[in-house]
Amino acid sequence: MFREYLYADLARARSLLAQRLGGVPEEHRSTDSALGHLAVGMRNYLGIGRETKTETYEQRSLLDAIFPALEELLDAERWLTDISPVVHSSESANPSDLRDLVEPGSIIRLTAHAQMFDASYVAHTFAGTSAAVGGISALSSSPNSGTTSGGRASGPQRERPGKSPKHGQPSVPVKLEDLIEDFPSAAMQGMDVRTLREMVKVTRGMFGDGLHLLLNTTGRVGWTATARLQKGRQYLDAEPEILFSRYGTAPLQWTVVGAIGHFSERSSTTGLREMDFMNPDGTASRSKMIAGLNSLMALVANQGFADTPPFPGFSIIPLAVYRLIPTARD
């Protein structure tokens, strides 16, 4: 197979492969040498000779071959389970079919249409749009419109984000919605600044920092699967703007190889009504508090407001995300 990688965690792949092989070669060296001897003179008595030696040296990196070797090894030794047929099955509607096949920690492969999402990309796109629309509107308006005799724009001024704090004052973190500048709503066909800022607030609240991969399934169960692509890993070295300009925002078919992080559970509001963190002797119970807060987090997740897949769903700790490169057509 010829793969195009969107993401590859080679450090984890090298660790897993080393456990199975006892070590991982990272480079291949080959040296070819040739020795020649030239002699002139009377045989067996006197001669003048010269030796020549030629060496060719080749070094090839094996880092890019680590994950294909690992995937092939895991598949051959039955450590890897392809769950695509079960997830996309149109016959069974029982979520236990998948949970009987794999469990948290199992290494799986799932091929599905997936969408990339990054909250900061949305904010920066809206910020660039607002700046462009505001500039075009200012250039197209008359020179004296909306200004006072002093040359400043009339009306309340919004403090620009990222302004340096005064000496002795703590710095205030910049919110993503503060990146959007003011612009006349008429220039955006009725879309005003407040709407764009509220939309960014929603994305900031529902999605954490970083690139998210949401996989769409077509089976009767309606499985949801999510994967967080960690920054700094190989092949994920581009900014979100570059990734979205390359692959767009529409769903594309990707193959994810990784480990099951956890399965989401059905949430219940019964435990939330009876959350009691106190022991009978009047001391606080840390275990009860954690259990109650985790129940609340599960309820929030199933409502779609937390960075975990709602039921029925599971999270994937990705080793690699790739798609196959098709062969040339005649």
Image (cartoon, rainbow, N blue to C red):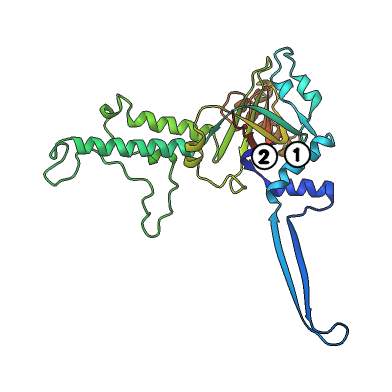
185 sits left or right of 77 in the view: left
Please say if the residues under marks 2 and 1 sit with CB atoms less than 8 Å apart: yes
Assign the C terminus to one quadrant of the image: top right
Residue farthest bottom in this picture: 46
Residue farthest left in this picture: 149
The answer to whether 197 is drawn above or below residue 98 in the figure is below
Residue at left 80%, top 84%?
A: 41
Q: Amino acid at mark 1?
A: Glu
Q: Is residue 182 visible?
A: no
The foreground one among 2 and 257 is 2
Determine which residue is flagged by label 1: 71
Determine which residue is flagged by label 2: 320
CA separation in Å, label 2 and label 1: 10 Å
The image's mark for residue 183 is none
Q: Position of residue 315 (x, y in %)?
A: 67, 32
Which comes before the other along the chain, label 2 or label 1?
1
Query: Is the residue marked by circle 2 packed among few (<14), some (14-19), or many (20+) residues within 10 Å?
Result: many
Q: Position of residue 76 (x, y in %)?
A: 83, 36
Residue at left 43%, top 30%?
A: 199
Residue farthest right in this picture: 44
Assign the N terminus to one quadrant of the image: top right
Residue farthest front in this picture: 42
Q: Position of residue 115 (x, y in %)?
A: 56, 29
- Per the image, label 1 sits on a secondary structure element best described as helix
Q: In which quarter of the view is residue 316 placed?
A: top right
283 sits left or right of 306 in the view: right
The answer to whether 30 is drawn above or below residue 330 in the figure is below
The mark lying in front, picked from 2 and 1, is: 1
Q: Amino acid at mark 2?
A: Ala
Q: Is residue 158 visible?
A: yes
Q: Position of residue 174 (x, y in %)?
A: 43, 45
